[in-house]
Image (cartoon, rainbow, N blue to C red):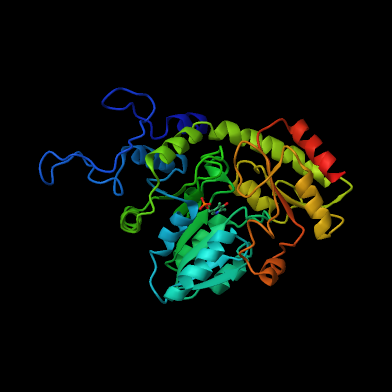
Amino acid sequence: MKIATKYIHAGMEPDPSTGAIMTPIYQTSTYVQEAPGVNKGFEYARSQNPTRKALEEAYAQIENGKHGLAFSSGVAATDAVIKLLSPGDEVIAANDMYGGTYRLFSKVFEKFGITFTYIDTTDIQAVQAAVSSKTKLIWIETPTNPLMNITDIESVAKIAKANNALLCVDNTFASPYLQNPLDLGADIVMHSATKYLGGHSDVIQGCLIVNDDSLREQLYFIQKSSGAVPGPMDCFLVLRGIKTLHLRMQRHCENGQKIAHWLRNHPAVAKVYWCGFEDHPNYAIAKKQMRDFGGMLSFELKNDTLEAAKKVLSATHLFSLAESLGGVESLINHPASMTHASIPREKRIANGLTDTLIRLSVGIEDADDLIADLEQALA
Ligand SMILES: *Cc1c(COP(=O)(O)O)cnc(C)c1O
């Protein structure tokens, strides 16, 4: 089935009691049982909810996976993956990833005796060299946030498989429209559904998608035992969001491309980070594993003072100054003080994330209006 058809029909069955075409919001905490132990497959809403079930089915389908699991946020989904591990286990993680993932690993899980090694995962030799007999998980994000580096998923999956480690890919930035890591050999796909999947900046949610039945059972056990499940209203919103993912992504990509090229030719701009440029260091891999290049990009000004960056950040009207990404409206963000403030400054700078970097989440407005807004802000 082609993407457009799949996104509209994924997980959707007419409601058995009424025929409602949209999955109802089953706002209930429990289910009446016919006799002790005799029920319709629903006992308590932390463990099962029909709205969540429809969404989890949709998650599986849009990532070409067998099982989907929904969580109350992206970080809750990440948290569940790390809870597969035990003290003494080692994780190899990307040195350029979402600040909240780094915070969860370093501030919450390190004290339970799990070791995290942060490396440049775009360098396959470095990944190979970092693996040890204790490595149980490799965690990558591609494209990365906010520097748009690309890691070769297929090559890392081969290293993980050869060493009996799991590979989890945070696919938030690409969305399933651009890239499907399970098809490239990954074991787990993670999304912050808050971003492109929800798509309207009105819900916090996360998800995991896997093929392996036993991995699904372990993650389901963690989901219900730790209890970070989303409510049915939030599940309904993401189900609705997925129906237009292909249309939105198409426009995000078109606008992203126009703005990336426009910024690159602007005399006040020193550098643009966008993985669709043919001279991007990982362009060949992006081209191989992604269907298009998305609407996320970052740039630096020629005037590399914090004052100049702050002026631009405060001068846009259509681009709202806010954290997050992937909604229909355009956002502008200052990673150093906003999304990535939880990463120590020296670490940030060593990885190339400067104090003056500006990140854009290009929305689906008219590209000419967005360019005019940036033009007046840069002036
Ligand atoms: C936002 C984000 C997360 C965290 O998701 P929440 O839904 O905010 O908990 C993880 N990874 C990436 C790449 C993100 O952008």
Residue 193, percent across and down? 50, 45
Which residue appears at 50% of the width and 49% of the height?
A: 191
Residue 201 shows in the view: yes
The residue closer to the viewer here, 73 or 297, is 73
Left-right relation of 86 to 318: left
Examine the image and state in which quarter residue 374 appears. Answer: top right
Q: Residue furthest right?
A: 267
Which residue appears at 56% of the width and 37% of the height?
A: 200
Residue 300 shows in the view: no
Left-right relation of 124 to 115: right
The residue closer to the viewer here, 352 or 75, is 75
Which residue appears at 52% of the width and 43% of the height?
A: 176
Question: Looking at the image, is 123 positioned above or below residue 59?
Answer: below
Residue 258, percent across and down? 75, 37
The residue closer to the viewer here, 168 or 155, is 168
Question: Looking at the image, is 281 positioned above or below residue 237?
Answer: below
Residue 184, percent across and down? 51, 51
Residue 336, percent across and down? 69, 60
Which residue appears at 61% of the width and 66% of the height?
A: 95
